[in-house]
Amino acid sequence: MPATPPLARPSPPLAPGAAPLLALADQCVQCGLCLPHCPTYQLDRSEAESPRGRIAYVRALASGQMAPGPVGDTHLDHCLGCRRCEAACPAGVRYGELLQSARALQATRRPPPARIRAALALLARPRLLAVLVALQRPLAWALPRRWRAGLPPPPRREAGRAAVPAPDGSPVVALFAGCIARPHEAGSRDALSRLLAAAGIASVVPSGQGCCGAAAAHAGDAAGAAKLARANRQALAGHDRVLCLASGCHDTLASSLAGLGRVEDPLVLLDQAGDRLKFRPAPRRVALHLPCTQRSVVRSEAALRRLLARVPGLDLVELPDTGCCGAAGLHQLAEPDRADALRAPLLQALADSGATELLSANIGCRLHLATGTTMVVRHPLDFLAEQLA
């Protein structure tokens, strides 16, 4: 009589809402090709601090094989969301989507720290944030020294040249202002308007827009991110082309405006202007930082290099790719020591470059880098507009 086969052990039930997350995690073939590209793996040399390790943890949670715990959650918290792994993955794992979904489930059982919730509340109120930034300069003396050291420099007051209106009948694009970028990139938006006008393109800054929602999504606040997305859809309705100055906001804004308008990097648009843009010589050394999101998501670094190459006499030093600068949205607030450790090799390369200023196309990177150097840190658009012939 044949032996009775053993009964199969039943699979544990999926965690609530985890089926889509498990499908995302199952795309990973555990090849490990992402590891050399992951800044946190390079920092700690720990499998748990790699994309492969985090995916394994998420898969175990989603399938019910493991209960969530503080150690695994900490490794998930440390992820920068830079998506360098996504650009290197041969299996096409949508790691950014997986991370946001995992953190949304995480937030249902463990809310973010109070300082992160406070930061998210402030980012969702850009007018209030702009007022506080405006008060930073006159009231800085009243703040504790350690607070002053951690705050980015207040926005520079650049006179700039008055914008030349684009010719009548020119195509019109909308400029995205965002949240912290509203005060800190006001000069950059003016610079972009001048560059666009020189290229024969008119621009407007629609009212009612706010934070793109990337910080909320990365913190697991899916509802908050969706609310911000709805507000931006309403504010930017009727504009089929929207220019996003910050590479870190680009992808989230594009998702919010899907089916409504096309989000573009202004550096790509200006590169396409060709000979319509002419620049004066700039005989000095300038350093260039390429943010993770510009490299891995927007991929506008080639357009930026071509634009800067058209400035006569410019001695451009592209900083080596030392990994993420550590800003990573609110990571610099949540994990300041790790953020500083990630920033250190980049600041050393900057100090060794002999440059007189630093250009970077992401607002979070610029603010984080500026707290670690006395060098001027600004958007490439500011530099290009300054050199307009």
Image (tube, rainbow, N blue to C red):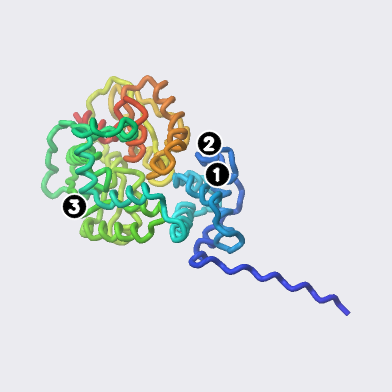
Using residue 239 as the reference point, say whether residue 299 is left or right of it. right
- Which disc is residue 43 wearing? 2
Distance from disc 1 to disc 3, alpha carbons, whole Å, reads: 41 Å
Among all residues in the image, which is located at the extreme bottom?
1
Q: Amino acid at mark 1?
A: Glu
Pick whichever of labels 2 and 1 is earlier in the sequence. Answer: 2
Q: Quadrant of the N terminus?
A: bottom right
Q: Amino acid at mark 3?
A: Pro
Query: Are the two marked residues, 1 and 3, in contact with CB atoms closer than 8 angstroms?
Result: no
- Which disc is residue 206 wearing? 3
- Which disc is residue 276 wearing? none
Q: Amino acid at mark 2?
A: Leu
Circle 1 residue? 49
Using residue 22 as the reference point, say whether residue 317 is left or right of it. left
Query: Are the two marked residues, 2 and 1, in contact with CB atoms closer than 8 angstroms?
Result: yes
Residue 88 shows in the view: yes
